[in-house]
Image (spheres, helix red, strand yellow):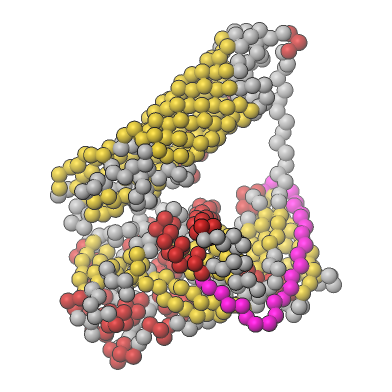
Amino acid sequence: MLPINKILPKVITCMLMIIMAGTTVKAQTTQPTWWFGASGAANFNFYDGTTQRLTSSLIAPTAFHKGKGVAPYGSVLVEYRPVGVWGVMLNVAYDGRGGKFDGVVAPCDCPATLKTSTSYIAIEPSLRLSVPATGLYFFTGPRIAFNASSGFDYTQLRQPNTSAELVAMHKTIISGQVGAGYDIMMSSANSTTKVSLSPFVSFHPYFGQAPRSIESWQVTTVRAGIALKFGKGSKAKVKDVVAAVPPPAPPVHSFVFNVRAPLAVPLQRQVSETLPLRNSVFFDEGSTQISARYVMLTPDQATTFREEQLQNAQTDNNTGRSARQLNVYHNILNILGDRLRANPNAVILLTGASANGPKEGKELAETVKQYLVATFAIDGSRIAVQGRTKPVIPSEHPGGTKELTLLRAGDRRVDITSASPQLLVEVGGDMMKPVQINATQVNPLDSQVVLNVDSAQQLLKSWSVDVTDSKGVAQHFGPYTSDQASIPGATILGTNPDGDYKIVMTGETTTGKPVRMESTVHLVRQDGAVVKGIRYSILYDFDKANSIASYDKFLTDIVAASITDGSTVIIHGHTDKIGDVDHNMKLSKERAMDVQNTLQRALTKAGKTNVKFETLGFGEDAANAPFDNNTTEERFYNRTVIIDIVPVK
């Protein structure tokens, strides 16, 4: 399906075409203060998250994730427009939010579909802002919706079709909307009875729009429609008639340049990291053998291998991760073998997935099983295997057309599942129990001088900075093309213990105009003992930002409990390189802010208020990415939010 950022511009373009068809007339009568009418629209609904439990007795064997649909919307409305640009609106509506989830394949290799017909009675009060001398207006406000219907139709090839009502539906939903419309006057300028035809479009983000009290199904809606409004004006006096004045030319954009500098510049930090492990082993295209990227041991080497041997690692880049951490990920089979050996009652299921069919998928799983049996002497009866065409949670979605080679590479894998907590933990799915790593971080993120230029990516060809100390010695950095860049504080300081620095940003707009802005920073090198920090990470499935609900317990019980009063919490979100650069930047910021909001709620509940947050999104930025994007493992582990807890100095 098309993403919202592709559909919304098309809807807006159609609205503008309707707006241009309207005519502007000089007012011979006053405009009504009160307007009444009705509207009709289409809701373009986009589903995300997870839905699997349908009724109290029916659980789909395979979870449904993305979906879409078009449903009707109709309302009666009233508007109050006093003199000026401000006003209020109220719609009482039937609000359809039905649609169809993307089809899935059940474990029996049976196609399954799920269609919903959810609808609401909605009350939508809005604040209205009119643009003077035009019919254009903007509106925003809450949406209070009362569930009217929650029917669904579920089909699966090898069982009877089911039509029923979804359980655990919220009876009331409170969310929000923002939109724009255009009033096209249909009555004559001399008539006191005013009739307005008003096309409009609005956006309803997923915030607050979880239809159910279970699982993580979210709905995002784009609404496009037209309203018919009536009002009663009065005759205007001649002296009140004012000729229309063309709007002034839009002002030149005023760029905002700001600099975030650390109070002290730590050169390195000792970090105790809880390192998450994906429960997947990825296979190269055309091969059913375990890739050479993975660390393979002989039976003699496996006899002495212990997971704890991987604990001490050193790092050498800004975000504090390196090939040594990736080495831990490539030891996943040895970690699994060690855990199975230490827990003789634990059993596992290996599920292989291959686009060539379940038979080859099972062959991939058998390859992993044979390694565990032959190398770690694990009893084969403890390891079950099965094959599929696609994994339970695939990266490639139906209808997708871009970068399919990379997405399909992520779906050629063997997933490890188990009910044993010594092997796996339920954090956003079947995640391997994390590994503890002790590392030394060089130039940690909070030692960076972060530069921000608003709208640089859209309005500037490029920009650079010159950093000059009090002696006139200058350093040049850039060019940059994104809105954000960072420079290690240690690089600016050099051998100086501290210093005052003038930072001059210069750039060129896309229209060829020069831009120059200035700022200053004071940097101090942090001497003395190395500060010890704590690091946690959480992982996301491809293109997911709202899966954070699955991590609530982990963030609340483990991460928030590790944060002491006075600490600084540095949260940075990342994505892999698949997809649009702008979309990935937005996605990384949404992931990071979701984590911050969850931690803040937990800290407030625990009475911890003296905690500082520094939250950043880096998108797919290679300079700050945890790993490269050359292999499937690197791309999967780049879909992450990293949380650094720095205690009070």
Q: Residue at x 54, y 26 (%)?
A: 89
**Residue 406: where, in percent of width, then height?**
39, 62
Which quadrant would the N terminus be assigned to in this image?
Answer: top left
Image quadrant assignment for residue 552:
bottom left
Position of 51 with respect to 512 (left or right) is left
Q: Residue at x 43, y 83 (%)?
A: 310
**Residue 576: where, in percent of width, then height?**
47, 62
Question: What residue range appears in magenta?
Answer: 510-535
Q: Residue at x 34, y 50 (%)?
A: 214
Residue 522 colored in magenta in the image:
yes
Image quadrant assignment for residue 634:
bottom left
- Judge whether 397 appears above or below 476 on screen: above
Name the one closer to the observer, 4 or 13.
Answer: 4
Name the one closer to the observer, 408 or 374.
Answer: 374
Name the one closer to the observer, 98 or 457.
Answer: 98
Determine if residue 588 is in view. Answer: no
